[in-house]
Image: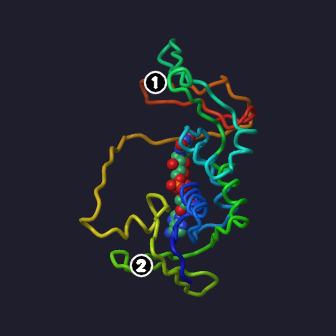
């Protein structure tokens, strides 16, 4: 198969990029390791900042997001007994939106066929080849057969642990990172949120966040 852009990873970045390119008439194929159900069952983000909502508006997929998402005009910082409110809308002119990453991914996924965005799920052993040449390509295994996609560009949207990052030759590109010595424990519960906005709390033993996904689901 030949395409203009091959994207590895059908998370929000890969699908959104695919839609943005399709809107410009560019041929795109997205290759994803997991099944659609697995991708939709992967609970992650819940708070969308302005850039993300603007991009969804730009590709005309923001209707459900604005109908079902919860606009937040601020959040609170808790420090001991003090609750300090940060009025985001007042300060920036824009609210943030609480809308689950899974819902955003579903909107991008559902619109893919009608917009000619081809997504190949359950592609195993995805590998990038000749990426420093004018004729890069990717290979993968699907239903026991090796497949190949030749592309003008390959975009790695497969996260930190995917094959794209590892394929970048040593000496090309630079990594900037700050590693914090913390781990996360996230609990998603079917109970109404304890507060109408998010609370970020400072504590001697670390940090806590009271967040939400909807009027009935807390994180
Ligand atoms: C618990 C949690 C809470 C978060 N909360 C927020 C929040 O409130 N707001 C916010 O903005 N962000 C939040 N984030 C961060 C947000 O989830 C990520 O920034 C986002 O998922 C990144 O999207 P992505 O498409 O780049 O990568 P991913 O969502 O990781 O998608 C990468 C895709 O590549 C696929 N892939 C991986 N390896 C391969 C391979 N070998 N071959 C083919 N495909 C492959 C994966 O299956 C996946 O579908 C949170 C993250 C976590 C973990």
Q: Mark 1 points at which residue?
A: 202
Question: Could you say where residue 75 lies in the image, as x and y percent from the top left?
Answer: 56, 24
Question: Could you say where residue 45 lies in the image, as x and y percent from the top left?
Answer: 58, 44
Side of 143 where 93 appears, left or right: left
Q: Do the residues labelled 2 and 1 touch (CB within 8 Å)?
A: no
Q: Give the residue at x 59% y 33%.
A: 96
Q: Give the residue at x 57% y 30%.
A: 94
The scheme the figure's colours follow is: rainbow
How far apart are the two marked residues, 2 and 1, measured between alpha carbons? 48 Å
Task: Quarter of the image for the C terminus: give it.
Answer: top right
- The image's mark for residue 217 is none
Q: Mark 2 points at which residue?
A: 136
Side of 192 where 171 appears, left or right: left
Find numbered disc 2 in the image and state the secondary structure of the residue it sits on: loop
Find numbered disc 1 in the image and state the secondary structure of the residue it sits on: strand
- Compared to 51, does 167 lie above or below? below
* Relative depth, front residue between 69 and 160: 69
Q: How many marks?
A: 2
Q: Give the residue at x 54% y 82%.
A: 2
Instruction: Please tell me how crowded label 1 is: few (under 14), some (14-19), or many (20+) other residues with Cα within 10 Å.
Output: some
Q: In which quarter of the image is residue 167?
A: bottom left
Point out the frontmost of discs 2 and 1. 2
Q: Which residue lies furthest to the front in this view?
A: 24
- Compared to 193, does 133 lie above or below? below
């Amino acid at each position: 198969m030949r395409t203009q852009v091959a994207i590895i990873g059908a998370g929000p970045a890969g699908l959104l990029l695919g839609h943005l390119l399709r809107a410009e008439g560019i041929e795109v194929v997205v290759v994803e390791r997991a099944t659609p159900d697995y991708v939709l069952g992967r609970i992650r983000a819940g708070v969308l900042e302005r850039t993300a909502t603007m991009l969804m508006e730009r590709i005309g997929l923001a209707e459900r997001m604005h109908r079902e998402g919860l606009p937040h005009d601020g959040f609170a910082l808790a420090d001991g007994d003090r609750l300090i409110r940060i009025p985001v809308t007042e300060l920036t002119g824009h609210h943030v939106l609480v809308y689950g990453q899974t819902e955003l991914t579903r909107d991008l996924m559902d619109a893919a066929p009608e917009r000619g965005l081809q997504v190949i799920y359950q592609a195993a052993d995805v590998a990038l080849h000749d990426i420093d040449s004018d004729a890069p390509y990717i290979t993968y295994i699907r239903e026991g057969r090796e497949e190949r996609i030749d592309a003008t560009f390959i975009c790695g949207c497969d996260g930190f642990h995917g094959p794209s990052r590892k394929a970048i030759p040593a000496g090309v590109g630079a990594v900037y990172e700050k590693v914090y010595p913390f781990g996360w424990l996230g609990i998603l519960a079917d109970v109404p949120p304890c507060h109408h906005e998010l609370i970020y709390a400072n504590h001697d033993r670390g940090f806590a966040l009271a967040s939400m996904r909807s009027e009935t689901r807390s994180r």
